[in-house]
Image (cartoon, rainbow, N blue to C red):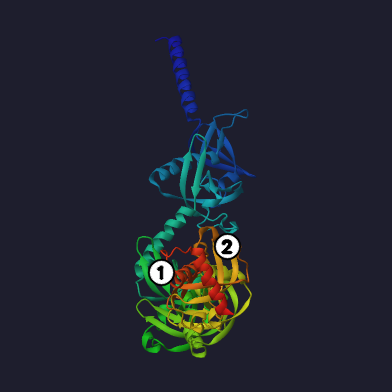
């Protein structure tokens, strides 16, 4: 080969090598490469990246939360190569980008394996905070900082701590992390260990952490237990704050442990003697004692007879007379009352009490003070379709039935004469203590006209005074008595033409014949017609017969003339 040929061959090889070198170097752009610190000038580090060129990186890129190492000449570092040369002939490199690339690779592996990653909270942004995950910046939502909301995250800033990656999007460069899930997991592990070390029935010390309407949460050293309000004391507790306060150290007994939910039920009263033991012997049925009203409901009132022991006075056992009133109208909270023991059930932990049993039955008292036949006075409290109710002493009522308002007139008519508020006297007819009923009579204040009038015989002639003239007949009163009766239209006269009530006037007296007298049924009926027919029959017998040829008028005329003479 000639010298010329050799020269051309060498030149072509050099060009090929140079082209290969440029191609290889260009391929390194956009990747992480190693370099050596060759010098440090002010705030910049000069790094030889091995491509016969050097680059500059700000020293601050080598520092940060959790990365305060001092950089010195000779240190080998990894940097991100943006471009091999810039206008100054230097390599464009970045430590931050290198770290970010490294971090993304590690974080993706951790995310897939659901592993925790270490990071530092370094800034506050809208809705949360930013976290440095060794170069990669992640977003920490405010709700994911802690198990409970915290106001100040200052103490957490710059502190290396574990996080869990919730979401990653490399294309958009988004990472969302949570500190809360790590705490919950750690707490759950601690709870499991602590729960496993506890036993039902164990007595343990705790600190009251929170108080609610239904109880208090007690910290048992890493796990909370619920101290329900009903397990704080044997007595009634209206609010947990009556027994415990936040921060108070308490000794509690573990009542129940739920291994699945890790819920623990606690009790204080279980450490004290049960006041219900031997309750039946201490409170025999019928015994009377004093108690304090602790609570009032629609169905009665609860009375504390001793600390931890309450009994119920049912509304039906509160008053002899007040049947349909709210218990709050009879007793008040904190009032001291006398009660009687009605029933004791130790198994169900129930005591039935009576308030009215400590007072005498007002119907018994009334019966003793007002036997049948005595006269009482009362105010008309109510009018009903079957009678009047009078208010009597002892806050009880007596009833005057319609049939006991008047001897002669119908009760439906007589009751209209009375109104609420009227003061009336009445006779006690009967007192039924068991049924709590008192029967009174108004008409019994006067004599019974049937008794006072004596006996009447059927056919007897009586004189009647007309009280009222009606279309259907006459209201009359038997002369010399208080008995009244009604003469029907058909009984006014023998002749149909004369059966006209308007022929008579109130106050006029007429004779009539008794056609019915039933003393037991209290009935008397009289008839003018019957009297006329009887007189006619008698006249016929005395003065002639139908065959004598005398007219009825003649006979009656003679009879009437004789009757007139006899009267004179």
- The answer to which of marks 1 and 2 sits earlier in the sequence is 1
| Mark 1 residue element | strand
Percent position (x, y) of residue 70?
Answer: 56, 51
Please state which of residues 42 and 403 is positioned toward the viewer in this rendering: 403
Q: In this view, does 519 lie above or below 188?
A: below
Q: Which is more foreground, mark 1 or mark 2?
A: 2
Q: At which x and y percent is residue 256?
A: 37, 69
The location of residue 11, given as percent across then percent down, is 47, 16
Residue 296 visible in the snapshot: yes
Residue at left offset 38%, top offset 82%: 344
Q: Residue 464 carries which label?
A: none
Q: Which element type, helix, strand or loop, lies under badge 2? A: helix
Residue wearing tag 2 = 501
Answer whether labels 1 and 2 touch (C-beta < 8 Å): no
Q: Which residue is drawn at 59% across and 70% down?
A: 466
Whether residue 232 is situated above or below residue 376 in the rendered picture: above
Residue 421 locus on image (x, y percent): 64, 74
Cα distance in 3D space between marks 1 and 2: 94 Å
Q: Name the residue under label 1.
A: 265
Is disc 2 surrounded by few (<14), some (14 to 19) or many (20+) residues within 10 Å?
Answer: many
Residue, far front: 549
Decide which of 35, 473 is in the foreground and name it: 473
């Amino acid at each position: 080969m000639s010298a010329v040929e050799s020269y051309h061959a060498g030149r072509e090889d050099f060009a090929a090598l140079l082209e290969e070198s440029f191609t290889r170097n260009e391929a390194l752009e956009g990747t992480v490469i190693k370099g050596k610190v060759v010098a440090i000038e002010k705030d910049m580090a000069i790094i030889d990246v091995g491509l016969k060129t050097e680059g500059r990186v700000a020293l601050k890129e080598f520092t940060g939360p959790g990365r305060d190492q001092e950089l010195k000449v000779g240190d080998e570092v990894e940097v991100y190569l943006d471009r091999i040369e810039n206008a100054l002939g230097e390599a464009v490199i970045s430590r931050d980008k290198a770290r970010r690339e490294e971090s993304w690779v590690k974080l993706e592996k951790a995310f897939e394996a659901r592993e925790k990653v270490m990071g530092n909270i370094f800034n506050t942004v809208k809705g949360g905070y930013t976290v440095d995950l060794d170069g990669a910046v992640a977003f920490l939502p405010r709700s994911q900082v802690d198990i409970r909301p915290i106001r100040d995250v200052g103490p957490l800033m710059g502190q290396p701590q574990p996080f869990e990656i919730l979401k990653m999007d490399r294309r958009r460069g988004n990472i969302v992390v949570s500190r809360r899930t790590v705490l919950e997991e750690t707490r759950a592990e601690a709870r499991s260990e602590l729960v496993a070390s506890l036993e039902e029935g164990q007595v343990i010390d705790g600190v009251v952490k929170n108080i609610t309407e239904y109880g208090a949460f007690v910290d048992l050293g890493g796990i909370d237990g619920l101290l329900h309000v009903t397990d704080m004391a044997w007595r009634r507790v209206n609010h947990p704050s009556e027994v415990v306060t936040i921060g108070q150290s308490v000794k509690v007994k573990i009542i129940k442990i739920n291994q699945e939910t890790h819920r623990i039920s606690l009790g204080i009263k279980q450490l004290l003697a049960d006041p219900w033991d031997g309750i039946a012997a201490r409170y025999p049925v019928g015994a009377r004692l004093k108690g304090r009203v602790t609570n009032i409901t629609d169905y009665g009132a609860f009375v504390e007879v001793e600390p931890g022991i309450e009994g119920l006075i049912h509304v039906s056992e509160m008053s002899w007379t007040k049947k349909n009133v709210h218990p709050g109208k009879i007793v008040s909270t904190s009032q001291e009352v006398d009660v009687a023991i009605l029933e004791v059930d130790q198994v169900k932990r129930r005591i039935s009490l009576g308030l009215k049993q400590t007072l005498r039955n007002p119907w018994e008292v009334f019966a003793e003070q007002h036997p049948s036949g005595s006269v009482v006075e009362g105010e008309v409290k109510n009018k009903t379709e079957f009678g009047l109710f009078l208010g009597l002493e002892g806050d009880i009522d007596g009833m005057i039935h319609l049939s006991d308002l008047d001897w002669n007139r119908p009760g439906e008519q007589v009751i209209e004469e009375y109104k609420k508020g009227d003061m009336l006297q009445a006779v006690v007819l009967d007192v039924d203590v068991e049924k709590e009923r008192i029967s009174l009579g108004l008409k019994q204040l006067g004599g019974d006209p049937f008794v006072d009038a004596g006996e009447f015989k059927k056919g007897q002639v009586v004189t009647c005074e007309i009280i009222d003239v009606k279309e259907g007949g006459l209201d009359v009163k038997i002369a010399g008595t208080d008995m009244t009766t009604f003469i029907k239209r058909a009984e006014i006269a023998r002749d149909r033409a004369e059966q006209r009530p308007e022929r008579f006037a109130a106050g006029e007296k007429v004779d009539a014949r008794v056609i019915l007298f039933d003393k037991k049924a209290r009935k008397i009926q009289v008839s003018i017609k019957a009297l006329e027919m009887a007189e006619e029959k008698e006249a016929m017998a005395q003065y002639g017969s139908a065959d004598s040829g005398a007219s009825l008028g003649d006979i009656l005329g003679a009879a009437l003339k004789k009757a007139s003479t006899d009267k004179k």
